[in-house]
Image (tube, grey):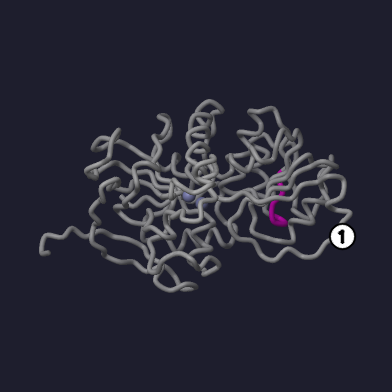
Amino acid sequence: MADTQLMQAMQVVRRGAPLEPMRLAVPAPGPTELLLRVHACGVCRTDLHVADGDLTEGKLPVVPGHEIVGRVAALGAQVEGFAIDQRVGVPWLGRTCGACHYCRHGRENLCDAARFTGYHLDGGYAQYALADARYCFALPDGYDDAHAAPLLCAGLIGYRALVLAGDAKRLGLYGFGAAAHIVAQVARYQGREVYAFTRDGDDAAQRLALKLGAAWAGASGQRPPEPLDAAILFAPVGALVPAALAATAKGATVVCAGIHMSEIPAFPYALLWGERTLRSVANLTRRDGVEFLRLAPRVPVATEVETFRLDQANEALGRLRAGRINGAAVLLPD
Ligand SMILES: [Zn+2]
Ligand SMILES: [Zn+2]
């Protein structure tokens, strides 16, 4: 074992504690896997939920990170369609069973046996990562590694949430971070009006929203100038559910897009009355990824990123927790 190659990684060892810098063995790819040299990895709010212990079904210790941009360093024996040094993207959906009712009917995002990157499987807060080639994406040219990374979760899951919001003209986005700043651009491209809701006094996020074409930006407790036809909640705050419903017109859909949310307070039925729909969005399908990554360069979606070294992962997570990231945070392990 003397020639085992080691890599730097940041690991969740104990939930609720800071990530720990580790030197781990560079893993060897299984038959269907790619070994990737990680060039960039986005920092997603889900990583915070994993680190903080809001989500407890994953493995421990775990290397978080599920917005991986890497280059192929080695291939498993059964991998087809990939070559050494090719750039690929790795999303949250790491593996599914392929056989259950959900998998066979276009809803692999709901597979009970799904395994998620940076949760059940080690992710991209490291110099190398493994990924099942069947769940990796080709990335559009025109994005460097750092700017491509947020497309892989903020973009993909934001896009799925936007599709589930239906053909709403007036779209409210609650929480204007990594996902919303991408969804706003797609929504504008589709001819919708965007209304951005942020934490009280978050001028930077409101300015970013207006720069990206939002018709209005304000605090999440405010009412928009016109009732919304749909709203997407990216902030993990249950109290925003009745607030968003109260801001909508009859027939509107409110989509909860995060994997975790604080408890939703009781609210009067009148807020849901009028055929309003309240729903969640869970994970992604590979089809979402293919569709969104084709659409992004056409819009064209431009991502705003703040970059950090791998050993600054705790600082990036702390800034995200405090709402002090403009756009998306991205780690650069190289
Ligand atoms: Zn399945
Ligand atoms: Zn994510």
Judged left or right of residue 229, residue 129 is: left
Q: With respect to residue 255, does 5 lie above or below?
A: below
- Give residue 235's quadrant in the image: bottom right
Type of amino acid under label 1: Pro
Judged left or right of residue 45, residue 88 is: left
Q: Is residue 60 magenta?
A: no
Q: Position of residue 32 (x, y in %)?
A: 29, 45
Report if residue 175 is visible in the image. yes
Which residue is nearer to you in this view: 226 or 156?
A: 156
As helix, strand or loop, the secondary structure at mark 1 comes to loop
Report if residue 204 is visible in the image. no
Q: Residue at x 33, y 56 (%)?
A: 126
Judged left or right of residue 125, residue 165 is: right
Q: Residue at x 44, y 70 (%)?
A: 18
Residue designated by label 1: 268
Q: Residue at x 39, y 41 (%)?
A: 89
Crowd class of label 1 (few under 14; some 14 to 19; many from 20; radius 10 Å): few
Q: Position of residue 263 (x, y in %)?
A: 70, 66
Residue at the top extreme, as displayed: 298
Q: Position of residue 140 (x, y in %)?
A: 42, 31
Magenta span of residues:
196-201
Residue at the left extreme, as displayed: 2
